[in-house]
Amino acid sequence: MKELLSRIIVGKDPVVESRIAHTRILLTGQVAMVGIFISLFYIIRNLILQLNVSYHYHAILLSVMILVLVLNRKGYYLAAKILFLVTANFLIFLFSSAASYYTGSFIYFIPIFLAAFVLFGYEERTKAIFFFLLTLFLFILAHLTDFHIVPQVTLSTRKMFESFIVNFFTASFLTMLLINFLIRENYYYTEELIQNEEQLLDKNTQLTKINQELDQFVYSTSHDLRSPLSTILGLLQVMELEKEKENAGYYIELIRNRVHALDHVIGEILDYAWNQKTGIQQDAINLHALLTEILTNFLQDEKTQKISIQIEVQPTLEIISDRRRLKIILLNLLSNAIRYHQYDQSNPFIRVSSTIHQNQLEICVEDNGPGIHPDHQEKIFEMFYRASDKTTGSGLGLYIVKEATEKIGGTIHLRSDYGKGSSFMIRLPMLQ
Ligand code: ADP
């Protein structure tokens, strides 16, 4: 019904600059339709009762209101509004100055006062004030002076009563239409304002968080970048002072370790930035092959060779996920499991297993290393959080793991028995 009315009034795809302009155009059409209804009612009634009273004025009202509808539909919105208000003012003046108070035709002055402001709105308030003053002038002329263009009509009490009922209801309906428009628009914009405010508060909280993270980021990364550099500078000085040239190899090894640490931090910063910025990919991944690829690098290290690394993943298992993010996640978890392991304990192991459960892929990276103290377990995924003073890392690894996991729609949980080992459980949605 609403759709049909809108189609009749504005056509299929009107080009309108704003929502309020659109509803105003609809309203112009609606009030013109009420005008058509009133004129038709009186024309039909007068025809049936074979009366001659103000017959042609209703015909004028009918044709002008049809013209208003046409102008409005053709996009001449201002012309339609002006034509409507001029005609309505003029006819209301004619009817109410010619008919008795008891017909109630003066009630139309109320919606016509309102219409001026509602149709033009605040943007075109000078036009609205002009029509308001015109209506006020015509009201005074019709009711406080003896001026009238058409001779006064005398109607029977019954006909006056009939006219009163029709006029009262249509004028009330028109008033309701206009007030409803105001209330609806007010409601719409208040709601929009509330929503905008909520979004703004949300954005503000996000920005504050990002700002704090950035502060911490700048502080911690500059510290993590400077500390290996200072060590390298110190080692170089010691090397210069060293008389025994054969000791150089020892210092070079220490410097190499520091350079690797530096490289690691830079790599983590790059991974972090990449994860924040880049959209998600959907790649077909063979999980077993990916794990083998990651472990190949680690296995060259002598210490890693002391750990039994078990991959309990079906070699044929293919999943759809973001390959690079999954690689970052597994690489960080495996690197931690290796770096923090106690190589000299009996039977050190790392186990990576996978299961499919309720359309979700679960990957578990487990080790029987030192475990993580319960005091640290909650904070372990925070940015730059280190669970012990002995760690050489930046504390960014698990933060990146969590961010990347969440970005590909997954979750990560830690289960750790302090002194016995840790297991990180990742749950990922199984994409088709
Ligand atoms: P880092 O760069 O310091 O390794 P992470 O965010 O990767 O930073 O890890 C945070 C802390 O969690 C580490 O400093 C370490 O103390 C602890 N940790 C992470 N993984 C393990 C693990 N598998 N076993 C024991 N401790 C771990």
Image: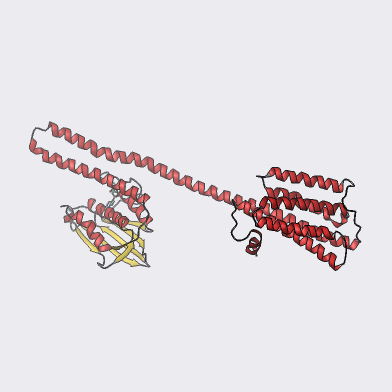
Q: Quadrant of the N terminus?
A: bottom right
Image check: 235 left or right of 59? left
Depth check, front residue: 296 or 94: 94
Give the residue furthest to the top: 241
Image check: 149 left or right of 350? right
Instruction: Residue 350 in the image: state x and y as whole percent.
Output: 23, 58
Q: Quadrant of the C terminus?
A: bottom left
Quarter-of-image position of residue 100: bottom right
Depth check, front residue: 186 or 14: 14
**Residue sitting at 81 percent across and 53 percent down?**
92
Instruction: Residue 34 in the image: state x and y as whole percent.
Output: 74, 59
Image check: 18 left or right of 320? right
Depth check, front residue: 356 or 341: 356
Q: Quick check: 275 above or below 315?
A: above
Q: How many marks?
A: 0
Can residue 399 be spotted in the picture? no
Instruction: Residue 46 in the image: state x and y as whole percent.
Output: 85, 64
**Residue sitting at 67 percent across and 47 percent down?**
121
For the rendered model, the colour scheme is: secondary structure
Q: Quick check: 199 above or below 249?
A: below
Quarter-of-image position of residue 360: bottom left
Instruction: Residue 398 in the image: state x and y as whole percent.
Output: 32, 51
Can residue 222 be spotted in the picture? yes
Q: Quick check: 427 above or below 263?
A: below
**Residue sitting at 49 percent across and 48 percent down?**
202
